[in-house]
Image (cartoon, grey):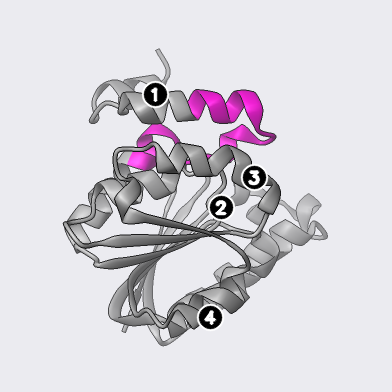
Amino acid sequence: MTLDDYIAQHIDPEPEYLYQLWRATNIHMLHGRMASGHLQGRLLKMLVTMIRPKNILEVGTFSGYSAICLAEGLEEGGMVYTFEINDEQEDFTRPWIEKSPVSDKIRFIIGDAVTEAPRLGVTFDMAFIDGDKRTYRETYEMALSVLRPGGFILADNTLWDGHVVDAAYDRDPQTHGIETFNDFVSKDQRVERVILPLRDGLTLIRKL
């Protein structure tokens, strides 16, 4: 038994709908491992339950797995606004979101969140950043601008398979984007931050 197997057996089970979505994602989409999965999905739901946000912004819907997990933790009247810039993923993702048990708490939008999210006129209590790594800093600035004081930003993939400490990846644009983001956030006096070494790295950021 691996440590991952042990963890999976000792946390809340993965809902059947999400398990089927995880399988379909890995069968039908390139880079299926980008979906949050069982452990991170249960953490996202738990964090939402703890923080009790009304409005959540997600940047990078992919197959919809994380959006559903975020929505699971919302109280009545809460909403996840999730943006996916790649319109080729809509045919796969939209039906999974619309048929989910929390579809009434998710607004799925095809478009660039950096320009489109501020136009919603919504003040967010939480943001989950999981989009293009090359533009993480720009996405962060946008999310911070629409986030209430005391609100939280969760940034995924911030350890990037360990590439952030591997000099061989210094010239890779996605690794460079993550490094630039991490370096900037670590010195940003507008926030508190901590990195969790969960899966590929998850940074929790609180706006002061």
Q: Are marks 4 and 3 in contact (CB under 8 Å)?
A: no
Image disc number at residue 3? 1
Is residue 36 rendered to the left or right of residue 77? right
Q: Residues within 10 Å of mark 2 (few under 14, many from 20)?
A: many
The answer, for residue 63, to whether it is visible in the render is: no
Q: Earlier in the sequence, mark 4 or mark 3?
A: 3
Distance between mark 4 and mark 1 Cα atoms: 36 Å
Distance between mark 1 and mark 3 Cα atoms: 32 Å
Image disc number at residue 159? 2
Q: Is residue 52 above or below residue 41?
A: below
Q: Is residue 72 above or below residue 18?
A: below
Helix, strand or loop for disc 1: helix
Image disc number at residue 53? none
Q: Quadrant of the N terminus?
A: top left
Helix, strand or loop for disc 3: helix
Distance between mark 4 and mark 2 Cα atoms: 20 Å
**Front residue of this view, candidates 90 and 144:** 90
Report the magenta residues as a range: 22-41
Q: Earlier in the sequence, mark 4 or mark 2?
A: 4
Q: Which residue is mark 4?
A: 141
Q: Residue at x 25, y 62 (%)?
A: 78
Kind of residue at disc 1:
Leu
Q: Earlier in the sequence, mark 4 or mark 1?
A: 1
Kind of residue at disc 3:
Gln
